[in-house]
Image: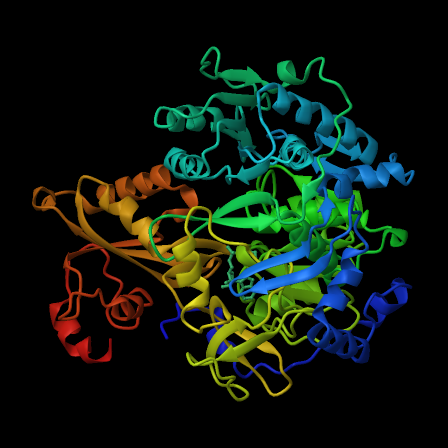
């Protein structure tokens, strides 16, 4: 197994246990799963009678027509709530309006404060009623462009309410969306739009980030030079920056919705109709379009959100997930899992440390946020910035703290618990993936005793196990492969346009079981400990990147002949990117510092800033085995500083090291 270095390595001895805090139990009259007996009973029920369990959960959603069969499982193909007709947008929006809750807040949005004026908060509070109107108008606008049921609409926007509105509008009319993270560059747009065959892209003129404008429309323009199939680009005016205009193709959002009716019926979607595509990195160069369908994803996100965060509309809750909607976390726990639970969801634009390092705490205080959900990398950044930032705000509204994206190191866990949670908020370390749709292993607040660094126990219906390559379950504490042995409603339904890759990636290594791609172990009490990816995927601060993607980007630079990218320990990100690069013959005299900057910029341009290597080292040749495989483990050791000194300016000669190490690859 070749797992990347991960902060989990020092966790193996962690056994401090934290029972659900008293204060949490006192403050929450309703706890959906209030003790471990209830958890065990419900979990067992979900294993012995999954169809009965999921039918009960699904009946909390609205269906135009009931399903005839809960599950049709033909490994690796699942159909959930077969024959059922529903609409995700109806469940997120209309249902609340129909139940007389139209005046309640659905979305609380906060724009990036103006530079130098932290008081100038731009806040929008959108009720379910207003959301229904805005979504319907935009849905009609999309229809006026010819968007039909079954089409895929690409959304490349900043964190503005209109992004959620556009997603819901697509769901309303039965078009799937493909959201592309606004931090990705033009070529990432090209790949995704081509694969999805989108004819319509919705974007913004720009997005605010740390006081400057990210030129989203310009990136779309650049991508469109290579995308002849794009017929319409809808542009939301956000920053007022200058944009180029392609007459006939481009339309302003505000012009397009002008005069559109507030009335747009929800399509009756089949449970297995595509709800969205979301592209994520895999071990080869091309990103995978993960397919999520309507009914199963809807039921799974609503159910996990309800239990994992103990959502209960009667208990004045405000939910704040800090993830960008461009990632699955934002899809599932800013929008789709939260709105049907009738708890206001907070969206923010900009960056965590802007205009100051207390941005989140300031928001928590002013909006009286009860649920705060972020990534370990963010917690480590908060620690580094210092406790004066959270200390200067009243955080007593907080009740549940969540983390997601990567293992959390105990030091960060304890800091989160003490400094943010004041020791009275349960921490839910939620393990899941783009592919799983929602949480698969997680504590339940008020119920599960937690241990820093462990994501604890499987969610209802998730038959998670640690196995060897033969699929045999391993004894306590043995490291192995994390698999799921039964289908669950939120599971991916495939990789868009790539059946073979779907089977190869998830269902081949251990036949008949879903392979998560993570190494894991389970301790004596059955708690799971995630030990990091077992494939060539690197988790950078909770964002997944394929080493091959970054390598291809590097190799496309004129100076580069060959490149190998591996993970290395990073104080804040958990794992950073180290690139080993061989240069062409003309580059012998090049200034290495300049070249390094130019390579970093090039990668940012090809993929996005998140893929910039943290360290670049030049070498005469990459260390390879006799059969020509790059010795990644050796490179990881070197990147971690285990083998050689951090001299990053000289060209390295690995041949000797490679010879010494050849035997262990
Ligand atoms: C990979 C999935 C799910 C939203 C964010 C990332 C890692 C995720 C945890 C956790 C340890 C975690 C795994 C997983 N991961 N959550 N709580 N503890 N590792 O989604 O980009 O699909 O990445 O993130 O390695 O496979 P993603």
Labels in figure, total: 0
Q: Give residue 353's position: percent from left, percent from top.
A: 58, 44
Q: Give residue 28's position: percent from left, percent from top.
A: 87, 63
The colour scheme is rainbow
Instruction: Residue 261: name its quadrant.
Output: top right
- Say whether residue 355 is left or right of residue 132: left
Q: Residue at x 69, y 80 (%)?
A: 17
- Say whether residue 393 is left or right of residue 472: right
Say which quadrant the C terminus sits in.
bottom left
Q: Give residue 114's position: percent from left, percent from top.
A: 63, 29
Q: Residue at x 84, y 55 (%)?
A: 312
Q: Is residue 472 above or below residue 579?
A: below
Instruction: Residue 2: name its quadrant.
Output: bottom left
Regarding residue 368, the answer to whether it shows in the image is yes
Regarding residue 104, the answer to whether it shows in the image is no
Q: Residue at x 54, y 39 (%)?
A: 179
Q: Give residue 346's position: percent from left, percent from top.
A: 72, 43
- Say whether residue 169 is left or right of residue 398: left
Query: Which of the two residues, 342 or 45, is positioned nearer the viewer here?
Result: 45
Q: Is residue 618 above or below residue 459?
A: above
């Amino acid at each position: 197994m070749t797992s990347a270095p991960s902060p989990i390595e020092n966790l193996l001895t962690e056994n401090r246990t934290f029972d659900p805090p008293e204060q949490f139990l006192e403050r929450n009259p309703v706890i959906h799963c209030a003790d471990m007996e209830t958890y065990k009973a419900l979990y067992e029920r979900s294993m012995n009678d999954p169809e009965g369990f999921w039918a009960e959960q699904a009946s909390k959603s609205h269906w135009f027509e009931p399903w005839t069969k809960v599950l049709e499982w033909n490994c690796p193909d699942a159909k959930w709530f077969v024959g059922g007709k529903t609409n995700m947008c109806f469940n997120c929006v209309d249902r609340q309006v129909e139940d007389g809750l139209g005046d309640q807040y659905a979305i609380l949005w906060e724009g990036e404060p103006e530079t130098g004026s932290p008081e100038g908060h731009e806040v929008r509070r959108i009720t379910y009623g207003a959301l229904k109107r805005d979504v319907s108008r935009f849905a009609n606008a999309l229809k006026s462009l010819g968007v039909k049921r079954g089409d895929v609409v690409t959304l490349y926007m900043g964190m503005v309410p209109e992004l959620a509105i556009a997603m819901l509008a697509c769901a309303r009319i039965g078009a799937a969306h493909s959201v592309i993270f606004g931090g990705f560059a033009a070529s990432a747009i090209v790949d995704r739009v081509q694969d999805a065959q989108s004819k319509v892209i919705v974007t913004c003129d720009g997005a605010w980030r740390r006081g400057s404008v990210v030129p989203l429309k310009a990136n779309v323009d650049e991508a469109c030079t290579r995308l002849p199939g794009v017929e319409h680009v809808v542009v939301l005016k956000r920053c007022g920056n200058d944009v180029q205009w392609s007459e006939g193709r481009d339309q302003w959002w505000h012009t397009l919705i002008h005069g559109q009716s507030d009335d747009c019926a929800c399509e009756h979607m089949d449970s297995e109709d595509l709800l969205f595509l979301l592209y994520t990195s895999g071990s080869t160069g091309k990103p995978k379009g993960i397919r999520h369908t309507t009914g199963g994803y809807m039921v799974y996100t609503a159910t996990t959100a309800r239990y994992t965060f103990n959502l209960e509309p009667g208990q004045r809750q405000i939910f704040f997930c800090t993830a960008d909607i461009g990632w699955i976390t934002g899809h599932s726990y800013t929008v789709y899992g939260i709105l049907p639970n009738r708890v206001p969801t907070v969206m923010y634009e900009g960056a965590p440390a802007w205009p100051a390092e207390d941005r989140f705490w300031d928001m928590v205080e002013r909006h009286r946020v009860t649920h705060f959900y972020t990534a370990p990398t963010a917690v480590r950044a908060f620690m580094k910035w210092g406790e004066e930032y959270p200390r200067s705000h009243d955080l007593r509204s907080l009740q549940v703290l969540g983390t997601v994206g990567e293992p959390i190191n105990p030091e960060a866990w304890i800091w989160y618990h003490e400094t943010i949670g004041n020791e009275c908020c349960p921490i839910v370390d939620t393990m899941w993936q783009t592919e799983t749709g929602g949480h698969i292993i997680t504590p339940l607040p008020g119920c599960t005793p937690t241990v820093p660094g462990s994501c604890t126990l499987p969610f209802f219906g998730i038959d998670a196990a640690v196995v060897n390559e033969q699929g045999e379950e391993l004894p306590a504490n043995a490291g192995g492969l994390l698999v799921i042995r039964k289908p669950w409603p939120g599971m991916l339904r495939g990789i868009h346009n790539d059946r073979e890759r779907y089977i190869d990636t998830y269902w081949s290594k251990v036949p008949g079981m879903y392979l998560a791609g993570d190494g894991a172990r389970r301790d004596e009490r059955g708690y799971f400990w995630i030990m990091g990816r077992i494939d060539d995927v690197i988790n950078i601060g909770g964002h997944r990147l394929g080493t091959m993607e970054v390598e291809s980007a590097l190799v496309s630079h004129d100076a580069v002949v060959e490149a190998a990218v591996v993970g290395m320990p990073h104080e804040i990100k958990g794992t950073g990117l180290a690139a080993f690069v061989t240069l062409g013959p003309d580059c012998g005299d090049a200034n290495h510092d300049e070249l390094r900057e130019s390579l970093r910029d090039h990668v940012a341009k090809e993929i996005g800033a998140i893929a910039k290597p943290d360290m670049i080292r030049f070498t005469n040749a990459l260390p390879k085995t006799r059969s020509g495989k790059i010795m990644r483990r050796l490179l990881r050791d070197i990147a971690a500083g285990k083998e050689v000194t951090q001299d990053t300016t000289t060209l390295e000669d690995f041949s000797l090291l490679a010879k010494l190490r050849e035997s262990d690859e």
